[in-house]
Image: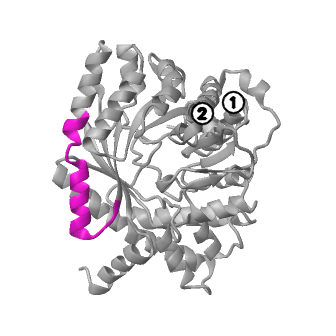
Amino acid sequence: MINTYDILETIRMIQDECLDIRTITMGISLLDCADKNIDKACDNVYDKICKKAEKLVATGEEIEKQYGIPIINKRVSVTPIAMLTGISGGDPVKYALTLEKAAQTIGVNFIGGYSALVQKGFSAGDLELINSIPQALAQTQHLCSSVNIGSTKAGINMDAVKLMGQKVKEAAELTKDDNCIAAGKLVVFCNAPEDNPFMAGAFHGVSEPDCVINVGVSGPGVVRSAVSKHPDYSINEIAELIKKTAFKITRMGQLVGVEASQRLGVPFGIVDLSLAPTPAVGDSVAHILEEIGLEKCGAPGTTTCLAMLNDAVKKGGVMASSSVGGLSGAFIPVSEDAGMIDAARCGALTIEKLEAMTAVCSVGLDMIVIPGNTTAETISGIIADEAAIGMINGKTTAVRVIPAINKNIGDELEFGGLLGSGPVMKVNTNSPAKFINRGGKIPAPLHSLKN
């Protein structure tokens, strides 16, 4: 039974501690839209998205009003477009413009799935789509793109790693007059999940239903507030407190997901119980770590605190939902987290420390601004390092870096909204070019044979 205290506590979390549902994301399969004629395929894509998601935004707004729960984003993810390109041929940018048009028609914040899965190699349509990514992102506002270049089962496709370093750099250069924003809408994965509701990495996996609703929750401010009230707790007591808090946050996500599913007549998929920060004051994962006892995020002990936080969030959240999936844990995007921004500005947080933290966090090197003169090979090296962490540890890792064209260390890019702003961080300038240019494939680790 819901009691008065629980209701008042939830109201306080929403009003004072930045609790929200970060996204309702509708996943839509486009496999039945494929056609050998690309123009016909684009028409099919537009029609299906508009039909399936025509009430998505309105339904989200109705749930917000009824329950008083902020739902920050309404989004759509689709089948990796490289699969359609492999059938139709032609210029993949046509699909990008179609997805942008559909996003504008239905009124969503983002649409994801301009994607390719190339961990084992390139099939028909993959190279064409990857090569088109910079232009596609530069010509659209709502479109997000992702490429999976490795997995624990397959190893790492180093040819794809080399290519993606180039495409990240090209995307930034094409939008250098708009804060290099195209690179901010592109993420490179290892072990990409097929049910991820969070952009820029969301796509609708081939094993998913024809249409599904996934929910992503947030709540770093709620966790920080809970920890701040108990300065004398031991670490195991802090872990237990975070578990209980994550349970409460995830229950709200479960409620919204089930309600949206019923109203839209679409199956409910998963709740992604990640702590997704924003640039807003009081909504920072870094500040949780500092509340636990670090002088500044990036100090010795940061990776340990993050590991404990991530594990406690998962343990608490998994009991609160009928189906947990996506990424689930604690995000550490630099530009989207006020505490991370402060730590990067003062030098307490470096890319090397962030890389160590990604071994235990929810995703990887996320929304990090790097100098504009960083070479494509260096970006590929960063991608390869992060993919190795994911491959060996059997977890999802990702890289979303933004080369700030014509800017140097200490300068800043201002994206606005949830993407926030970020200082240009120092990158190791010793070249990995010979390694990256070897090409080929890094074999899967031995435990990939487990079945």
* Residues at discs 2 and 1 in contact (Cβ within 8 Å): yes
The prevailing secondary structure element of the residues shown in magenta is helix
Residue at horizontal 46%, vertical 28%?
Answer: 136
Magenta highlight on residue 66: yes
Q: Horizontal and vertical percent for residue 270?
A: 34, 52
Q: Residue 376 carries which label?
A: 1
Q: On the rendered structure, is 440 left or right of 218?
A: right
Residue at horizontal 70%, vertical 51%?
Answer: 411
- SS class of the residue under badge 1? helix
Q: Which mark is residue 242?
A: none
Taking depth in this image into account, of 271 and 175 the one nearest to the observer is 175
Q: Which colour scheme is used?
A: one colour
Q: Name the residue under label 2.
A: 168
Q: On the rendered structure, is 404 left or right of 24?
A: right
Q: In this view, does 39 lie above or below 312?
A: above
Q: What residue type is labelled 1?
A: Ala
First to last magenta residue range: 49-71
In 3D space, how far apart are the residues under numbered discs 2 and 1 (Cα atoms)? 8 Å
Q: Choose top left, top right, bottom left or bottom right for residue 86.
A: top left
